[in-house]
Image: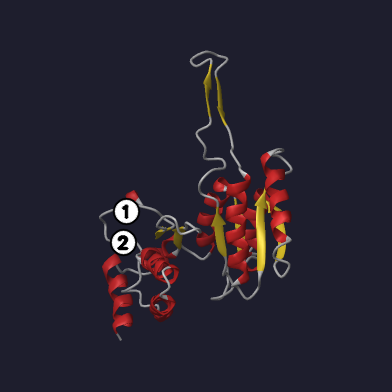
Amino acid sequence: MPGIKSPLAGREPGDIDFYVVRENTEGEYSSVGGKMYEGTEREIVIQETVMSRTGVDRVLKYAFELAQTRPRKKLTSATKSNGISITMPYWDERVIEMAKSYPEIAVDKFHIDILTANFVLHPDWFDVVVGSNLFGDILSDLGPACTGTIGIAPSANINPEGNFPSLFEPVHGSAPDIAGKGIANPIGQIWSGAMMLEHLGYKEAGDAIVTAIEEVLSEGNSQVLTRDVGGQGTTESLGKAIAEKLIK
């Protein structure tokens, strides 16, 4: 609307700096449910949310321990217990219980609807945000978009116990709409590699990659940067520029 300024306008580097931790094995994305009276006017479709103590506590423990490593030591829980009256109150209960083991972590919670609004209005409020499978899925796309593009955002599917390999990939996924055009921003993929190195114990190498990314973005060369960050460059030009920073 005329006269209204976007709350994201004028944000400086460092103003938006938070993690989204998503439960990724159960929750709303279960296959429990089905159809009844299919093909009739009485047709009903049901899909159930599954939350186990093991699954919820597992993701909460990871999120709290991540918050411990951050200077702000703050955790925000995404909930909707005012409308989803069984599973979300249970989620809230487990957050309260888990918080007792981490007294140094400041904890708050928001219902998912106002939380998405506050990602845009007040992104500086957040440090580590933890949510269920569905809520985390939504927030992990919205968060990077608040920075200007989802093309730079890394992600990881972590196996905290180390029983299986963890998987690292950009938030944007395969982006089939721009596949083969040479315009995809490679930073999300490259940064995911940096996260993988840190996960494997090579923090110095991971930090070097992130520094190279920051230097290339700071230079703002429109012939290097891809379209999603205001440039006319290609996947190759941006990837090459980052690689050259690492070689130096």
Q: Which mark is residue 178?
A: 1
Instruction: Judge from the rendering whether residue 73 lies leftward or rightward of residue 184; answer left or right.
Output: right
Which quadrant of the view contains residue 12? bottom right
Point out residue 190 in the picture as x, y percentages from the top left corner: 36, 68
Vertical arrangement, residue 21 with respect to residue 81, above or below? below
| One can see residue 190 in this view | yes
Point out residue 243 in the picture as x, y percentages from the top left corner: 30, 76
Point out residue 220 in the picture as x, y percentages from the top left corner: 40, 77
Instruction: Judge from the rendering whether residue 119 lies leftward or rightward of residue 205; answer left or right.
Output: right
Could you say whether the residue bearing mark 2 is in a helix, strand or loop?
A: loop
> Local crowd at mark 1 within 10 Å, few (<14), some, or many (≥20)?
few
Residues 189 and 225: in front is 189
Instruction: Judge from the rendering whether residue 235 lies leftward or rightward of residue 209; answer left or right.
Output: left
Q: Which mark is residue 183?
A: 2
For the residues labelled 2 and 1, say whether their Cβ atoms are less than 8 Å apart.
yes
Point out residue 84 in the picture as x, y percentages from the top left corner: 69, 39
| One can see residue 1 in this view | no
Real-space Cα separation, disc 2 to disc 1, in angstroms: 7 Å
Which three-letter amino acid code belongs to the residue tagged 1? Answer: Ile
Name, please, the residue furthest toward the top: 40
The structure residue drawn at horizontal position 70% and vertical position 44%, both measured from the top left corner, is 90
The structure residue drawn at horizontal position 58% and vertical position 54%, both measured from the top left corner, is 58
Which three-letter amino acid code belongs to the residue tagged 2? Answer: Ile
The structure residue drawn at horizontal position 33% and vertical position 82%, both measured from the top left corner, is 245
Could you say whether the residue bearing mark 1 is in a helix, strand or loop?
A: helix
The structure residue drawn at horizontal position 64% and vertical position 65%, both measured from the top left corner, is 126
Which quadrant of the view contains residue 225? bottom left
> Local crowd at mark 2 within 10 Å, few (<14), some, or many (≥20)?
some
Vertical arrangement, residue 137 with respect to residue 99, above or below? above
Dividing the image into 4 quarters, which one contains the C terminus?
A: bottom left
